[in-house]
Structure formats: C-alpha cells, structure tokens
C-alpha cells in the first residue's frame, strides 16, 4: 500500500493565512480548526480493494479499468457506487436509522488531475447500466428548481465541480443555490414561485457526483467554506495516479472486452429487491456505534461537524453495500456496516489530505510555536500579546494574524477555562 498525498499545488497566498482569516469568522470555525490540528498527521492512503466485495459490480468495473486503462481506480469505484445509490433513490428507498429516515443518496467530490479520465469513466460505465436519467446542467438557481421538479431522484454528474461551487458565491443568478443545496441535502421541501407557476418539491433527492481538478480546487473553494460546514456536506475522494499504471502507460482505452461482464454484474443489481424502507438490525447499530467511537479516538478526533457527517455516510453506504452484495432482505446487517466502515475510512483519509493542502500543517506548526512563546512569556509573568507574537514568529506579520492565532490557542469558551485576552 502506498501513501497517498493530495496532488494540489500551493495557492498564491500561504495556506496558514487563509485558515487564520477563516478562524476569525466564528467560534465554530476556530473550534473546527483546533480539532483539525489535534488530528496530527496520518497516512492518507486509499484502501480501495478492502472496500470492494469480490465479484461485485464495483469489483468488475474497477477490474476492467485496471486492465484496459491507466485511469485512477478511485474513479470507476466512485462512479459505480453512485450508480447504485441512484438506483436506490429512484425506487424511493430510505433507511430507518434510530428513528430518522436517511436517504442513501451519495454526495461525492472526486479530485483528480486534469485529463485523468473523469468524464470518460462516468459515461462509459453508465452505458452498461439502466441509469439513464441524469440531472441537466443548471444555468441558474431558478432553472435548478424547475429541473428538479422534473428530474427529482436522479444522478447529477458535474464536471469542474470546484468551479461550480465558486460560481455559487460569485454569480447573482446562482445566489440561491447554496440554500437549495442545503435543503436538498436534508431532504427538505424546496419551493419557488415563478411567473408561470408555484413549484413545490417534497422529499427532494439527488445523487451528486462532482468531479474537479485537484490542482484548482483550493482556488475555487476557500478555507472558510471548508470550516463553516457547507463543503463538509460532500464526501471527498482523492484520485491520484497509480504508480503501477502511470499516465500514458496505456495508449488507448478499450473496455469492449469487459462490457459483457460489467453488464451482467449490473443485471444482478437490477434483480436485487429494493425496499421502500430498510430497517437496521441491532447488531448493525452496535457495529456502527463501535466503529464511530474507534475512529473518533484515532488521531485524537476530527471536528465534530465534519467527522459526524462523514461517519453517518456509513448509513448510506450500508444500504448501497446491501444491494451490492445481492441481499434481498429489508434489514441492513452488521456485514453491510462493516463494508461501509472501510469506505468511510477512505473518505476520512482523503478529507484529511484535502484539509492538509489548505495549510493545516503549517498552521499547526505556527500554533505550537505560539504556545511556546506564550508559555515562555507567562513563566516570566508577562502577557502574550499580538505584538509579542509578531516579534518572535517571523511568519506572523500583521496584528490581525497574531490576534487570530491567539484566539486559536486560547481555550474554548465552553471549556470553563478563562479565555486569554488578545489585546
């Protein structure tokens, strides 16, 4: 197994400056950054094979791309999972998990190099399935609602997804998209009045598969979007090149020798019963709780919001694996959640890789240095001020940066400890 690193170039501004700026937005942002720094470093490696049942549709698809292309295998794996997720929501399936009805709709963002084969992979695999209704490209927030009324419960394939997220914050005709996406994620009713009619979409659901160039993602999605929660709705998959199959090692892609195997594997998906409501066995609940606590303790924890959202994707994945394994029963099992946990582990690792590229490692080193400065000053009976940090830490050059750094190293207000004054 090779160590995965996010292949994203550094932006013009140092990452730590962006994170410091983001930390001034709210106490929630500061708490998220504190938790991220406690995570420590870890090997962000894809354990893809361990999360793919042998002989399944995903396995057949990945095996075909491994033999016939040099495309990173995260791409066919993510597309295949999204196709099964789409079949589930098209049938109106939900999971009754602890009294909450959870949609099995995946929201995935694949980060890969330019020319890695993102669009080719999606278009090729869809040819061998019965998923035909794709969500059209929205030209505005108003058009998005109109299209959702006629294409609810479909697959939204979006290339250059980072650019789309950037447009939401910059283009007036997309200004309402953020609210619509948040409501869509939660399955809340979406309404809009037009000159022609009043549109009301109850129980909206889409499978979102956004594909974006890794090198430009950080430029499109700022640090504050990562820590304020909006970008945390997505599951991140980093698709780096396979050393055993480097780019240009395959002159042409030809999947035709594998099309019968892929089609037959999907036919088994079609033949598996889809239930309107899936219950979760007591053993499965216990497995989820155990896995939740185990992963929470690894690396001293993740930000509660980010960690919880990724971990609860296990419920969505468990339903997908249930169908992938050909189980016709209406009860999700501990086995389903065991497979789901392996996939969630990949998303946790890849989320860490994304966050590292925002300058988290550098910011963490600055925080540790600031703590050393503070401890030294306090041992001498002096107060640590922004001016003191500027004098003793070369990379801190402004009062705003120093004040933000002091706010990060101060104990959270809800901890009961006195918050140091950053005057």
Image (cartoon, rainbow, N blue to C red):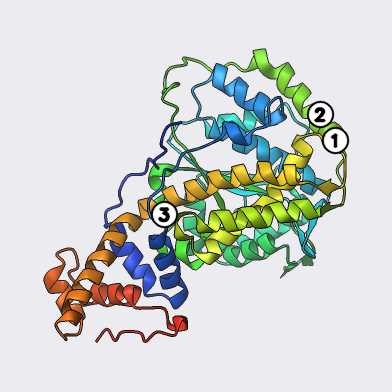
Left or right: 292 as drawn, with respect to 394 = right
Callout 2 environment at 10 Å: few (<14), some (14 to 19), or many (20+)? some
Residue 272, disc: 1
Q: Secondary structure at mark 1?
A: loop
* Image vertical order of residue 206 relative to residue 255, above or below: below
Callout 3 environment at 10 Å: few (<14), some (14 to 19), or many (20+)? many
Residue 407, disc: none
Count of numbered marks: 3
Residue 355, disc: 3
* Image vertical order of residue 295 relative to residue 128, above or below: below
Q: Is residue 197 visible to us here? A: no
Of residue 3 and residue 102, the one placed in the foreground of this image is: 3
Q: Residue furthest left?
A: 391
Callout 1 environment at 10 Å: few (<14), some (14 to 19), or many (20+)? some
The answer to whether marks 3 and 1 mark residues whose Cβ atoms lie closer than 8 Å is no
Question: Residue 39 lies in what quarter of the image?
Answer: bottom left
Q: CA distance from mark 3 to mark 1?
A: 38 Å
Please give the residue where the numbered disc 2 appears in the rendered image.
Answer: 268
Of residue 55 and residue 39, the one placed in the foreground of this image is: 39
Question: Residue 387 lies in what quarter of the image?
Answer: bottom left
Point out residue 386 in the picture as x, y percentages from the top left corner.
20, 79
């Amino acid at each position: 197994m090779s160590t995965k690193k996010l292949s994203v170039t550094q932006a013009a501004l140092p990452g730590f400056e962006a994170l410091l700026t983001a930390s001034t937005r709210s106490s929630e942002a500061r708490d998220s950054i504190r938790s991220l720094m406690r995570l420590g470093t870890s090997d962000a490696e894809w354990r893809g094979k361990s999360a793919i049942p042998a002989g399944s549709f995903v396995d057949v698809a990945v095996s075909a791309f491994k033999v016939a292309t040099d495309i990173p295998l995260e791409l066919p794996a993510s597309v295949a999972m999204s196709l099964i997720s789409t079949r589930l929501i098209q049938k109106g399936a939900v999971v009754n998990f602890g009294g909450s009805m959870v949609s099995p709709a995946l929201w995935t963002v694949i980060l890969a190099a330019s020319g890695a084969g993102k669009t080719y992979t999606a278009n090729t695999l869809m040819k061998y399935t019965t998923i035909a209704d794709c969500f059209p490209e929205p030209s505005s927030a108003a058009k998005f609602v109109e299209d959702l009324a006629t294409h609810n419960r479909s697959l939204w394939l979006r290339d250059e997804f980072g650019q789309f997220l950037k447009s939401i914050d910059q283009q007036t005709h997309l200004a309402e998209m953020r609210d619509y996406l948040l409501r869509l994620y939660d399955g809340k009713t979406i309404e809009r009045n037009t000159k022609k009619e009043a549109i009301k979409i109850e129980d909206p659901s889409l499978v979102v598969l956004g594909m974006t160039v890794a090198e430009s993602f950080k430029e499109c999605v700022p640090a504050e979007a990562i820590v304020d929660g909006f970008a945390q709705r997505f599951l991140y998959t980093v698709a780096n090149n396979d050393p055993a199959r480097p780019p240009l090692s395959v002159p042409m892609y030809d999947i035709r020798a594998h099309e019968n195997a892929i089609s037959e594997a999907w036919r088994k998906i079609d033949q598996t019963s889809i239930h309107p409501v899936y219950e979760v066995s007591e053993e499965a609940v216990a497995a989820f709780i155990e896995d939740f606590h185990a992963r929470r303790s690894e690396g001293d924890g993740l930000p509660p919001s980010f960690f919880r959202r990724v971990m609860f994707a296990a419920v969505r994945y468990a339903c997908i694996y249930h169908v992938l394994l050909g189980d016709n029963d209406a009860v999700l099992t501990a086995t389903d959640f065991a497979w789901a946990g392996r996939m969630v582990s990949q998303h946790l690792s890849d989320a860490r890789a994304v966050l590292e590229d925002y300058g988290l490692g550098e910011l963490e080193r600055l925080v540790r240095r600031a703590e050393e400065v503070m401890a030294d000053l306090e041992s001498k009976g002096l107060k640590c001020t922004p001016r003191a940090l500027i004098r003793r830490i070369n990379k801190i050059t402004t009062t705003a940066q120093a004040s933000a750094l002091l706010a990060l190293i101060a104990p959270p207000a809800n901890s009961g400890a006195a918050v140091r004054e950053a005057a």
